[in-house]
Amino acid sequence: MVKHIVMFDFKDENKQENIAKAKEMLEALEDTVPSLNSMEVGINFSEEARAMDLSIYTEFDDKAGLEAYAIHSEHLKVVEFIKTVVIGSKVSDYII
């Protein structure tokens, strides 16, 4: 099984609205991308300086499933939006 975790740091402009929209768009992928087994999308509540604003946790059967997700047309629409509203992100992919 492959785990894919991404954390995003959003720009200050329209921050809460953009976080909510990104969360909604990401969660819609669970019903759209066949290789996506499960997804959790969480909005940060920590006030630590190192905290990121939004995190996603996804599971796939294998690396091929993750790769199919990465190029899926609906996922690419979400990526396109997120790139316009974030200042940075971090990713971790691993196999268990």
Image (tube, rainbow, N blue to C red):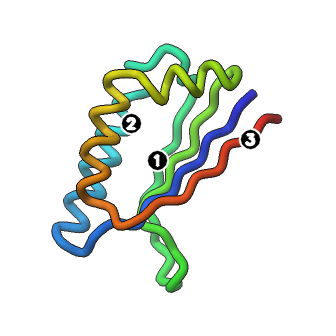
Task: Name the residue type under label 1.
Answer: Val
Q: Is 39 left or right of 33, judged from the image as shown?
A: right
Residue in the picture at 17% in, 67% down:
14
Q: Quadrant of residue 74?
A: top left
Write down the residue under mark 3: 94
Q: In this view, which residue lies farthest toward the top?
A: 34
- The circle drawn on residue 41 is 1
Rounded to the nearest angstrom, the CA distance separating label 2 from label 3 is 21 Å
Q: Disc 1 vs disc 3: which is toward the camera?
A: 3
Q: Position of residue 37 (x, y in %)?
A: 58, 23
In primary-sequence order, the first of circles 2 and 3 is 2
Q: Quadrant of the N terminus?
A: top right
Task: Name the residue type under label 2.
Answer: Glu
Residues packed near mark 1 inside 10 Å, few (<14), some (14 to 19) or many (20 plus): some
Write down the residue under mark 2: 27
Residue in the picture at 82% in, 35% down:
96
